[in-house]
Amino acid sequence: MNDIEKVKQLRKLTGAGFKDCNAALKESGGTLDKAAEILRVKGIAKASKKMSRTATEGVVLVSGNDKKMSVIEVNCETDFVAKNHDFIKFVKELSDLNNTYSSSIEELKKSSMKNENSVDENLVALIAKIGEKITIGRSKTFNNKNFINYAYQHSVIDDNVSKLAVIVSLKTDEKSDKVDLFGKQLSMHIAASNPIALNPNEINQKLIDKEIELISEELKNSGKSEEIAKKISLGKINKFKEENSLMTQDWVMDPKIKVKDVLQGLEISNLEIGDFVRLKIGE
């Protein structure tokens, strides 16, 4: 059996990656059983097998301050593991590192943790110990000059650890109690209303096309004339844009007014909503 065939056989036996199998075979002097044992001891074989499974549970974490703030999602298979002490300890340290590396996942995975092992190495060890697939998901960092960041977390599991997290960034020349209150309420509004864009014209065209397709299918067998169907379709699309854009959504605290009306009513010059992110486990 040549070296390539041995690597293929070892991958089949352990579920580990090509690079890990190749290294283990070199370390074992080309002996398959010994190479498999090396991978098991390192936890790589066990962890790799777990990675073929589905991870739809997990947590989202917020770290940083009002000048630089980050959010990161870490997925696992069960809610039980999402509350596990070792898992929570790992994700908290990971979240702080994520803010340091400004949500560059590539740099994050290579960075060293407190035990001097890399994030990737600690992740493999944790998977092997807990026995579930664990993956690093979505992340984003807000770090813009003259912006203030506000966060809100829902279904909180531990400090800065939850099932849903929002960060919203406000551009302003002044930091006041009024601005702080709006920032906190706005982040709560985003958590509840789940906007997909700041303004109607910023919604991804693919989402609009999909909505048009669904509306057309709905009206196909309605018996209405083509002209009336077009008017209804246009009205539904405009409503879709309005309901899914932050500025034109009904304000959660008072549904009689829009978010843009609240912003205008504050009468604070140069106050703008810069950007926002909403991460929820399972979405």
Image: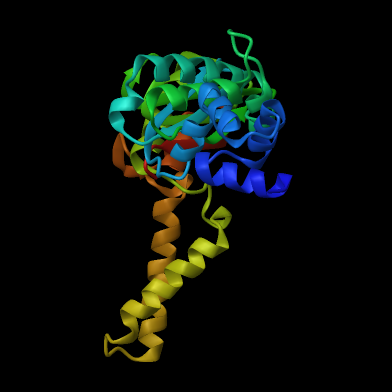
Residue 96 vertical placement versus 82 (above, below): above
Q: Residue 16: which quarter of the image?
A: top right
* Placement of the C terminus among the 4 image quadrants: top left
Residue 131 x %, y %: 38, 29
Horizontally, residue 213 falls left or right of residue 274, namely left
Of the pair 219 and 118, the residue shown nearer to us: 118
Horizontally, residue 204 falls left or right of residue 253, namely right
Residue 67 vertical placement versus 220 (above, below): above
Of the pair 185 and 257, the residue shown nearer to us: 185
Residue 74 vertical placement versus 207 (above, below): above
For image coordinates 51% across by 33% down, the residue present is 45
Mark yes or no: residue 180 visible: yes
For image coordinates 42% across by 40% down, the residue present is 259
Residue 229 x %, y %: 37, 83
Horizontally, residue 53 falls left or right of residue 172, namely left
Mark yes or no: residue 183 visible: no
For image coordinates 36% across by 85% down, the residue present is 228
Q: How is the image coloured?
A: rainbow
Of the pair 89 and 266, the residue shown nearer to us: 89
Residue 201 x %, y %: 57, 57
Q: How many numbered badges does the structure rendering display?
A: 0
Residue 64 x %, y %: 56, 16
Q: Residue 187: which quarter of the image?
A: top left
